[in-house]
Amino acid sequence: MTLHLPNVTFHDRVEHALADTQLHVALERATGRFTTLRADALASLPEAEAVRDRARQIRAHTLSKLDVYLTQFAAAVEAAGGQVHWAADGEAANRIVLGLARAGGVKKAVKGKSMVSEETGLNHALQTAGIEVIESDLGERIIQLAGEMPSHIIVPAVHKTKEQIGELLHEKLGVPLTRVPEEMTAAARASLRGEFLAADMGISGVNFGVAETGTLALVENEGNGRLTTTAPRIHVALMGIERLVPTLDDLGVMLQVLARSATGQKLTVYTNLITGPRRADEPDGPDELHVVLVDNGRSRVLGGELAEILYCIRCGACLNACPVYQQIGGHAYGSVYPGPVGAVLTPALGGIGPWNDLPHASTLCGACREVCPVRIDIPRMLLALRDEGHQAGQSPLWLKIGLPIYRVTATHPRLFNIAVRFSAFATRLIARAGWMARLPPPLSGWTAHRDFPAFARESFSRQFRKRRS
Amino acid sequence: MAVVRVLEKIGLRVEYPEGQTCCGQPAFNGGAFDDARAMARHTLDVLCGDAPVERLYNLAPIVVPSGSCADMIVHHYPELFAADPVYGPRAEAVARRTYEFSQFLVDVLGVSDLGAQFPGKVAYHPSCHLLRGLGVSEGPRRLLAAITGADLVEPADPAECCGFGGLFAVKMSDISGTMLKRKLDSLEQSGAQTVAGCDVSCLLHLAGGLHRRGSKIETRHLAELLAGQA
């Protein structure tokens, strides 16, 4: 499990993010745009709500019979001439890909976008073994050149402004400095063309695997995914074991909501359906097709109360809609899966231990649930994870002390009334003109950004009693 | 008290069961489910008295003047006691007859004009748990629109969270603070003189932020505006 940046606390990362003005410009531009585009795209889909319901049903059904569909999928992939590999965890997945690379004499690999490969740390594993890996997705290429990790599920370089990207390409690729996105794209394209032709292996992710046909569905907008999966002689596709749909018809339903929720497009520019390697009568395509099915904690999640997070189709809509993500961006989460979905998926896969802060980085406002194409109840799972962390003793000391006091007070009305009267007295004593601008920790968190009013002189229950008598 | 005045104005008799404390939402949102359950049991005891379960559905409706507390009772109490043979049925029965204040007026009683008067530009803040938890959106706006003298203005991104989130405002103070700033900026740009809402915790958060920046915008619970008469 290589989900996180070590040695930096969540609070330090947040502080860093909030102080980064460039990040704010980039996030404001991108998340606002995606949110509007998504809303428009869904409005243009007839019966959008019914399609979302159907998409959710498909995901729920598939996961309830995942063992059956995995077996069917694996058999179909092999029947089409592909090879299936099973990886219990991230290390196993990396080992499998490395083994395939060595067996095929691979010196250079091009890679399309794959969140699973980020999860397993594949690039690092291959590069350590002396195999060069070139990211072919423009966003991924940008962060590879910058030596960073993705900060968004579908827009990995969303944290960068176009100005910053222009400078980066100028510095790393030696292209003329520009602020025009089209010129940057052209420069990246020119530098990537040669890589596709020189690579021995193409590595990709998978958006959906179709169980009945063994088809891999990959959506993208740049054409790099198509080149990555067809130009090199070996194609290795990495996919999480949950990423299946039963039939091609089901795939059609999922594609109706995926691009709309992700980028606001009706469909992505490229929708690749890959069934098996190049056949004898076909002019191009890879000689070998390998599908690596990665578990890495998923089968454990499947049986528990967080299973619903596996419905996720990685559209990123919850990130764009989340008011917390909009402020802190993806890197602050520290995981390859940021935002609301990441705040559930990361501790679900990696354990609550190192990730206890993530479920708390939410106001439970429900914007994520509202935009999720498959209606995942993310707030419910954030709460369940908070409870798990609390039970594991991860709450701060003041809460550990405060909660039992609060509980006793709130279950004994007399004590509660005394506490209310005391608070009214105390707050009126220290308040100036009815407001307090400074309170001791932990309430200093409140007064760091806002004032707190003194309590009313008389509680509601007393006022009500007086009114009645 | 404004809620009581409004309900009495339309001819209802209001009871206040003594012994009420806190519904337990802060503990629930903090992830302390056990503590939340203890407080929820207390609240259910107070609201049910010694009535047998089969009679609980026939008792008077419960009106809650705060969206997130109502959402806690309506949605999370039944979840918390899903496996409890004693409190499960009580939670279901209480959830069925609990309404947030504006929801009760508009959806249950069909009232939308209370003949109230309030001068000035008013912005409505649709609190998250009220909007996305209970699905209340149009009702409060209709009630506000019917107030003589009140001019409803719509700030940018009205449905965006104000950043309160219970303990979030204390634990993740800086993130909460930047969210609050966005919200207050949009309220000020809207030209509103009053921001009205149906959730006391969001209003408390907004009021604290507005006071800190010395803003002239005032926060009011919807009931306070509805109780206003010429």
Image (cartoon, rainbow, N blue to C red):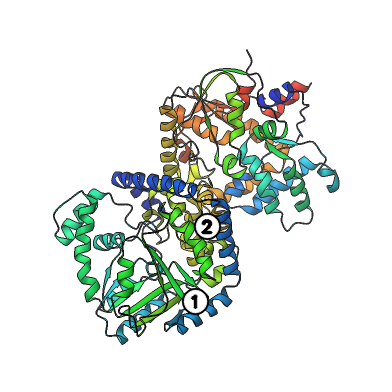
The image shows residue A303 at horizontal and vertical percentages of 60, 69
Q: Secondary structure at mark 1?
A: loop
Q: Quick one: which residue is furthest to the front in this view? A: A281
A114 or B95: nearer the viewer: A114
A444 or A179: nearer the viewer: A179
A393 or B195: nearer the viewer: B195
B131 or A206: nearer the viewer: A206
Label 2: chain? A
- Would residue B4 appear left or right of A182 to someone viewing this image? right
The image shows residue A256 at horizontal and vertical percentages of 48, 58
Which amino acid, by three-letter code, is at mark 1? Thr
**Alpha-carbon distance for marks 2 and 1?**
46 Å
**Which residue is the site of mark 1?**
A213
Crowd around label 1: few <14 · some 14–19 · many ≥20 (10 Å): many
Q: Secondary structure at mark 2?
A: loop
Which dot marks residue A394? 2
- Would residue A379 appear left or right of A160 to someone viewing this image? right
